[in-house]
Amino acid sequence: MSRSAPAAEAAPADPAPGPDAAELATLFAPLAGHADVLLAVSGGPDSTALMLLAHRWRTQCHAATRLHVATVDHGLRAESRTEARDVAALAQRLGLPHAILDLAAPLPGTRLQEAARDARYEALAAHAQAIGASALATAHTRDDQAETVLFRLMRGSGIGGLAGIPAVRPLGTITLLRPLLGRPKAELVALCEAAGIAFVRDPSNSNPRFARVRLRELLPALAAEGLDAAAVERLARRMARAEAALEAATDAAAAALWPTRREGEPALTLPRAGLAALPEEIALRLLGRAVAAVGTGPVELGKLEALLAWIAGLGPDEQGARTLAGAVVRVNRRSVALAPAPARRPSGSTR
Ligand SMILES: Nc1ncnc2c1ncn2[C@@H]1O[C@H](COP(=O)(O)OP(=O)(O)OP(=O)(O)O)[C@@H](O)[C@H]1O
């Protein structure tokens, strides 16, 4: 990584530009309900700004929440330890406890970015629990939100995926918070610079080997056509609203069609006519839940669409069976029955 400015002994400038006390109180309101919050700080500009702003919020708004900081050292680059120690030094100057976390196991050679992210969240969540923090805060920005939504659009995501990164979500037994999700990255970079704080720039963020990086390079051209981060974030908010309504409608359909189904039951049966009578989007979601409940987990939307189209295309007296994501789906005149697929099946046999 390259540093934006010398990792000097510069004390954070005060008073610094950025949100005032009232804005800080709004931004960090989701943290206020937790006695202890762990801040995930990589040393990049966004998370360095998160640490500065959260500290300012605590002091200026007299918040009672105790802040802790952790940096995950993935051990992938020679400089990573020094960078983690620089974050530790800044945290110390702010009076915040800091920990450097190593990964539990070496990372695989494939899907490195995804594997690193999963391992990072695991390490951060485990540390949060160990220190008694009930929430973990990351520094995702409006730019991250826009990038995620466009990336998912490119990958054929449905409404849920286009809802983007949630500002609050459960992470095991703790809560994951993203208080800066509505703020532009440029503002956070400017804030660090104005405060005289050095930050690191991860070279993997500009490595065109990664699809996300190639997409990021297209963003200025899209913004010039009006599809900027604010527009994408608005789309994500609307999608999140639609997603919540559709999930509620699916809950209602599930309650009507499986009123007696208990958690952990190995097989379930949906009335074929009841499924056919639902709006297609709700039928897809219900079928997706059913497959995930008896099979091996979430199903790709395209495969689910193909399954529903196959069911809908069967004549009233026709029957058949298909296997999807570890679930066998058997259709007869009256019902669509789902059961776990046997662990190993002879190839081609789905009946
Ligand atoms: N090495 C690290 N140590 C601590 N926190 C980190 C580290 N890397 C990232 N984070 C946290 O995660 C946030 C998002 O980082 P980044 O955008 O690089 O992650 P990502 O791989 O895109 O993961 P996500 O799926 O969470 O978006 C950062 O702002 C920071 O809060």
Image: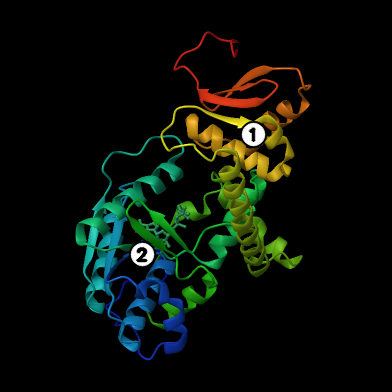
Height in image: 127 above or below 8? Answer: above
Kind of residue at disc 2: Gly
Quarter of the picture containing the N terminus is bottom left
Q: Cα distance, mark 2 to mark 1?
A: 41 Å
Residue 24 % position (x, y): 43, 82
Whether pointer 2 and pointer 1 mark residues with C-beta atoms closer than 8 Å, the reply is no
Which class describes the residues within 10 Å of circle 2: few (<14), some (14-19), or many (20+)? many
121 lies left or right of 219: left
Residue 20 visible in rendering: no
12 lies left or right of 25: left
- In the rendered structure, find residue 43 and report the number of the disc placed on it: 2
Mark 2 or mark 1: which comes first in sequence?
2
Label 2 residue SS: loop
Height in image: 44 above or below 347? Answer: below
Q: Is mark 2 within 8 Å of ligand 1?
A: yes
Height in image: 301 above or below 313? Answer: below
Quadrant of residue 194 within the rendered picture: bottom left
Kind of residue at disc 1: Leu
Residue 212 % position (x, y): 57, 50
User: Residue at point 42% right, 38% down?
Assistant: 263
User: What residue is shown with label 1?
Assistant: 304
Quadrant of the rendered image holding ligand 1: bottom left
- Between residues 203 and 45, which one lies in front from this camera angle? 45
Quadrant of residue 253 within the rendered picture: top right
Quarter of the picture containing the C terminus is top right
Q: Residue furthest top?
A: 346
Residue 92 % position (x, y): 22, 74
Label 1 residue SS: helix
The mark lying in front, picked from 2 and 1, is 1
